[in-house]
Amino acid sequence: MQYPGTNLQQVFNELSITMITDLLFNKIPTLLAASLLGGCLMIFIYKLTWKQQISRLGKRSALIPASFMGLSEVYCVLKYAKMNKNREFWAMRFTELQNYTMELEMLWKRIIFTSEPENIKAVLATQFNDFGKGEVFHDSWHEFLGDSIFSTDGELWKGSRALIRPQFIKDRVSDLHIFENHVQHMISLIPRNGETVDIAELFFRFTLDSATDFLLGESVNSLGTTGEMKFVKAFAQIQQYQNDVTRLGPLRVFMPKGNFKENIKILNSFVEPFVKKTLQLKPEELLEKTETNYNFLHALAGFTRDPKVLRDQLVAVLLAGRDTTAGTLSWCFYELAKRPECVEILRQEILDTVGPDAAPTYAHLKGMKYLQHVMDETLRLYPAVPFNIRVALKDTVLPTGGGATKLEPVGVPAGTPIAYSALVMQRRKDIFGPDADEFRPERWRNWSPKPWTFIPFNGGPRICIGQQFAYAEMAYTIVRLFQTFDGVQDRMVVPQFERCETTISPGAGVKIALRPVKN
Ligand code: HEM
């Protein structure tokens, strides 16, 4: 006997099977094909529009040949980045195209790459108002950097710059005692018996300790801690994530967030208690503390009581000031270990100027020419921010690199990202000569680079605020180290490589042995 319900059930079953089959084999493919076609059509129309816009404004630069709507090139970028060969990749493309300005069409976007001094100067200085960090950068870095000096443009940026600038005036920068304790702590950890040490690891800890001391009035004392600190690990992972996001461009939406949110929580729970404690102080208490025992947070809180502003600026300056100096010091010792004759000249200058054990003054540091050449040569070969990006805020041009002559202005419609590389430019043989890849501090003796060919601190209105602070910190550290040690031995056993995140650091560490001075 058959129940009417069973029939109905069967009908339903068959119906849903028919529907699913229809959906799977007819509707979904049709829908997919339609959206793909629609997407391609939109990209085609979009491209046509901006191609017209470009030709109204100027010429095109060298086009990077790429298939699958530019995705083949994204694959190459990621492949070379994974092999830590970002510089080589850019240099290879510039050479292939015989133009230091080139462009890629990717999906509906056009991205320009340049290592041409004239164009970099336009982006950073002469056409400053035409370019900025842009909304995409601001939004994709917002959870990390908020509305800080690093991630904003226009009035917001101006406000941040005005707030932070006074903290880096000469009087403050020349106050070197903030480095002394941390340098001595680091020196005490260096073996005296010829054992190998990874000096890069020590430099990263040292700059973290002095940066947190300067910014918060309390050092995290990473030099006194064994193993990796939770906050340090989170900070590094956040930077890596943010960097990948920038590299992926419009494909960033597909990037998994991993433990990014968790890391942001760790970072905030490190910084926020300091902000809270500072805001509990009355304005007169703050003023007194700033005068007697300066720290950046107290000084800033004298201008704003907004906890979010304080948090954002602190994180930005920590990012700007820590890895940059640590990376530069690391590369400096990596190169010095291969040039004992440079160490000898440098040490002699230190002994002649400061003596064997006195603490160097600001005037001492400024007076040592060879020391300055060593730091500049390091920054030429390894500019701390190797790759950078700006976006056109309005329709504009780049002054050169376009058309058949490669000298005509390049049309740049609003919204076009411009990636530029100080690293690639500062290794150009046509600018720095056939020995451009070599570490030769002597080259600076009777020579100075042409304007806009040496820009480790950027240039124009957004030039690094911490430049003098960074030189003072690095010079102080180098002097103190060479008063204690008189020789550096290269102990690298694996090949070195350039790890390029936001900053450039020696990926294999810097394994050396330091020879203590005999008393
Ligand atoms: C070797 C050391 C350093 C190098 C090579 C360096 C380089 C740079 C570069 C290239 C920029 C421009 C980034 C951009 O606009 O996209 C920059 C910005 C900045 N740097 Fe440095 N930096 C160093 C150390 C420091 C230190 C020690 C501090 C502070 C303690 C600092 C604070 C800043 C700030 C606040 C900005 C943002 C400026 C703005 O956007 O107006 N930097 N730095």
Image (spheres, grey):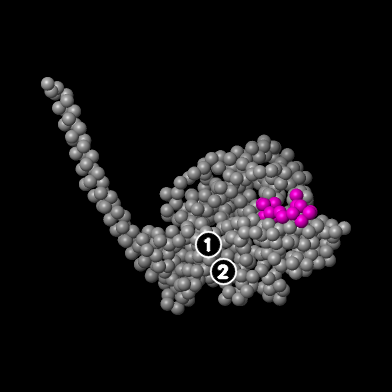
Dot 1 falls on a residue whose secondary structure is: helix
Q: Name the mark on residue 86.
A: 1
Q: Quadrant of the C terminus?
A: bottom right
**Residue with the mark numbered 2:** 425
Per the image, is 193 magenta? yes
* Residue lying at 73% horizontally and 61% vertically, measured from the top left: 489
Per the image, is 136 magenta? no
Cα distance in 3D space between marks 2 and 1: 13 Å
The kind of residue on which mark 1 rests is Asn
Q: Name the mark on residue 401.
A: none
> What's drawn in magenta, residue-wise?
189-204
Q: Are marks 2 and 1 in contact (CB under 8 Å)?
A: no
* Residue lying at 52% horizontally and 51% vertically, measured from the top left: 242
Q: Quadrant of residue 348?
A: bottom right
| Residue 275, image x, y percentages | 64, 40
* Residue lying at 42% horizontally and 53% vertically, measured from the top left: 251
Can residue 89 be seen here? The reply is yes
| Residue 388, image x, y percentages | 54, 60
Q: Quadrant of residue 46?
A: bottom left
The kind of residue on which mark 2 rests is Met
State the residue in front, 156 or 46.
46
| Residue 28, image x, y percentages | 26, 46
2 or 1: tag closer to the N-terminus: 1
